[in-house]
Image: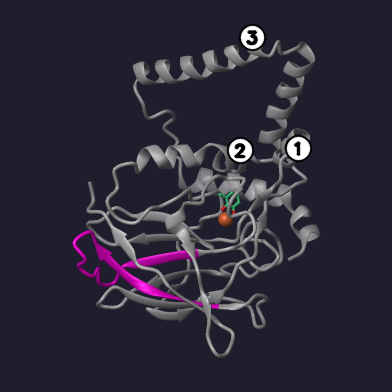
Amino acid sequence: MSETITTATAADSGASATERFLADKTGGTGPGADTTRVNTLATEVITAVHQVIRRHHVSYEEYNALKSWLISVGQDGEWPLFLDVWIEHVVEEVAHASRKGSKGTIEGPYYVPGSPARPSVATLPMRENEAGTPLRFKGQVTDISGQPLAGALLEMWQADDDGLYAQFAPGIPEWNLRGSIVADAEGRFEVTTVQPAPYQIPTDGSCGKLIAAAGWHAWRPAHLHLKVSAPGHEPLTTQLYFKGGEHIEDDIASAVKPELVLDPRPAADGTGEVTYDFVLDPAS
Ligand code: MBD
Ligand code: FE
């Protein structure tokens, strides 16, 4: 785990995350809600800011510091990072409050659709001598009545041992530690990867400046990202963490849930082995 490598790439990863979001997540149609809804939400957000200013007697100096910081977040391309770290977890909580199947959590800024397809028993695309303890992760995908979901798709993505994501940091093969595993006829899968390291969000951009100015830390616990999907079912976006890992209790992105913590056991050859099953809700 190297802290210096992560800090060298904030501008690249911010710009890439912004491009990625604009490519995948916006239809170019602007706000999708009606006037009443926009009026309600925008008015309440603005009013909440007014209340903070009054309560804390915010000065012109502070107002101008905020203004220049907000400008720099956009210039750095760090709005996806800022929003996914400090806001998305509450959106996810509200969106999925009545889910019956597996718990999910935030997507974060580094998902890329269309990763290479792999069979149900597979190794994630990785470099020769990819750093990190090997991890074998297996399980089954079912519906909420326990019926296997044949051919369910598990899209996985994770940072490498230096905390860097392929396509968001330079010098990493395009699909490194990213893959789309197709479960077998019983919904089963067995994926070999490497155990991820704790992840520090870029410290040299605007989000890093906020973290330093507020005396916070920049860490997320080590995590695997997954999107699990099957026809006729709600796709599940989740992350899995590691028991006893650093920052499990103080994730900067507030995205850890007790149901999402793995406890791999070392096999004879040192590979961590763990089973985790996914339960998908019916499509709504
Ligand atoms: C990540 O890797 C991540 O998962 C989130 C949520 C935010 C920043 C970086
Ligand atoms: Fe992540």
Measuring from the top left, give residue 164's x and y in whole percent. Answer: 67, 61
Q: Earlier in the sequence, mark 2 or mark 3?
A: 3
Q: Are marks 2 and 3 in contact (CB under 8 Å)?
A: no
Q: Earlier in the sequence, mark 3 or mark 1?
A: 3
| x 41%, y 41%: residue | 93
Magenta stretch contains residue 149? yes
| x 65%, y 60%: residue | 198
Instruction: Give the mark toward the camera: 2 or 3.
Output: 3
Above or below, 262 against 126 in this view is above
126 horizontally vs 9: left or right: left
Measuring from the top left, give residue 269's x and y in whole percent. Answer: 57, 89
Which residue has dot 2 on it?
Answer: 79
Which residue has dot 3 on it?
Answer: 54
Which residue has dot 1 on it?
Answer: 215
Q: CA distance from mark 2 to mark 1?
A: 20 Å
Is residue 284 visible from the viewing direction of this image?
yes
Q: CA distance from mark 2 to mark 3?
A: 26 Å
| x 27%, y 51%: residue | 100
Question: In terms of image quarters, where does ligand 2 lie?
Answer: bottom right
Q: Which element type, helix, strand or loop, lies under badge 3?
A: helix
Q: Are marks 3 and 1 in contact (CB under 8 Å)?
A: no
Above or below, 37 against 134 in this view is above
Q: CA distance from mark 3 to mark 1?
A: 23 Å
Magenta region, residue range: 135-156
Q: Which element type, helix, strand or loop, lies under badge 1?
A: loop
Q: Amino acid at mark 3?
A: Arg
34 horizontally vs 158: left or right: left
Magenta stretch contains residue 247? no
